[in-house]
Image (cartoon, grey):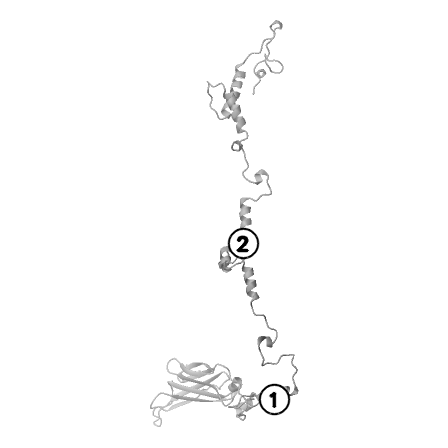
Amino acid sequence: MQRIGDSTSTANGSKEFTQGQPASGVDATLLTPAWLNAIQRELVNLIVGAGMDIVPSDDSQVLNAVKALQAAAGTWAKLANKPTTVAGFGITDAFTKTETSSAIQKAVSDLVASSPAALDTLNELAAALGNDPNFATTMTNALAGKAAKATTLSGYGITDAYPKTSTYSQAEITALLAAITDRLVQATETVQGIARVASQVQVDTGSDDTAVLTSKKFRSAKATCSAWVSWNGTGTVAVRDSFNVSSITDNGVGDFTINFATPLANPNYSFCYTVGGISNALNLSSGGSVAPTVSALRVTSVSAAGMGTGANFVMTDFPYNSVQVFGGK
């Protein structure tokens, strides 16, 4: 805003208009173009600022502009730099949209907790309760009709048992002991009873027909075979069947090593090795050049076609080979 005194020196000390004093040589205040233009710009800006266009023929525009600005002063849409968040208004005791969603989700999660998928909604839970709004009362009434738990034999209708509070007579005790004694008899092929375990000596000698034999003592009995095997020795060794033999090593033609699955207790065992399956030949078999050990036995086999005519013994693989081992226990 420009005062008249800002554009001319003819204004008074307060930069206001004066009519002057011609008699005293004081001029009246002059109207300068600068001041008039400043006033015009102020008025035009007022009208334009109110959102109106300048209309030369309308003498009420300044008034209307003031009224429009006054009316818009209290309108929210006309405010500049309006806050857009709760915090922007300085409000600290209200939930934001994010906080509200989080609080609701947590409340729902707490309600559902770890419910199975078939019961994680109120509808599913209601269906599981039979849509019974008085489910608790219904269950209470149902439980009220159940049979009471008995605390005595007679409460269960049992009449053929002794209660722990009973006092037994000497005759009853004697009868009970006699019944137990009747069961404590030596078991036989036809009578149920008790039996003791046979010792290893009894198993080996076969001297006791009243003691029972365990699997361990049977395995350790000297009268039983410690190991045996049947195999085809031609081509690749093929074991037909065996007991306590893990494998057979082919050392060459007519030369094999029998490997025991479980080592024997000592190497002082007896063995038998037989071969067959080749006609017109005298088949011989024997232990190999290596002494028997607790873990293996080496054997060899030969044939002598036309024996008696000077034919030589020849190391030979036979289709049928059999070894039985006894002892070593």
Residue 264, position in %: x, y?
51, 84
The residue positioned 39% from the left and 88% from the top of the image is 275
User: In terms of depth relative to the viewer, which is nearer, 50 or 281?
Assistant: 50
Q: Which residue is mark 2?
A: 109
Mark 1 closeness class: few <14, some 14–19, many ≥20 residues within 10 Å:
few
Q: Nearer the viewer, residue 126 or 247?
A: 126
Q: Amino acid at mark 2?
A: Ser
Secondary structure at badge 2 equals helix
Q: Measured from the top left, where is residue 280 in percent x and y?
A: 33, 91
Q: Position of residue 1 (x, y in %)?
A: 56, 21
Horizontally, is 289 left or right of 23 in the view? left
**Place of residue 113 in the rendered image (x, y in percent of width and height, measured from the top left):** 54, 56
Of residues 230 and 143, the one drawn nearer to the viewer in this rendering: 143
Q: Residues within 10 Å of mark 2 (few under 14, many from 20)?
A: few
The residue closer to the viewer here, 219 or 75, is 75
Q: Secondary structure at mark 1?
A: helix
State which tag comes first along the sequence, 1 or 2: 2
Instruction: Mark yes or no: residue 178 visible.
Output: yes
CA–CA distance between discs 1 and 2?
A: 69 Å
Residue 178's label in the rendered image is 1
Q: Is residue 153 visible?
A: no
Amino acid on which disc 1 is placed:
Ala
Q: Is residue 19 left or right of residue 128?
A: right
Residue at screen point 66% across, 87% down: 170
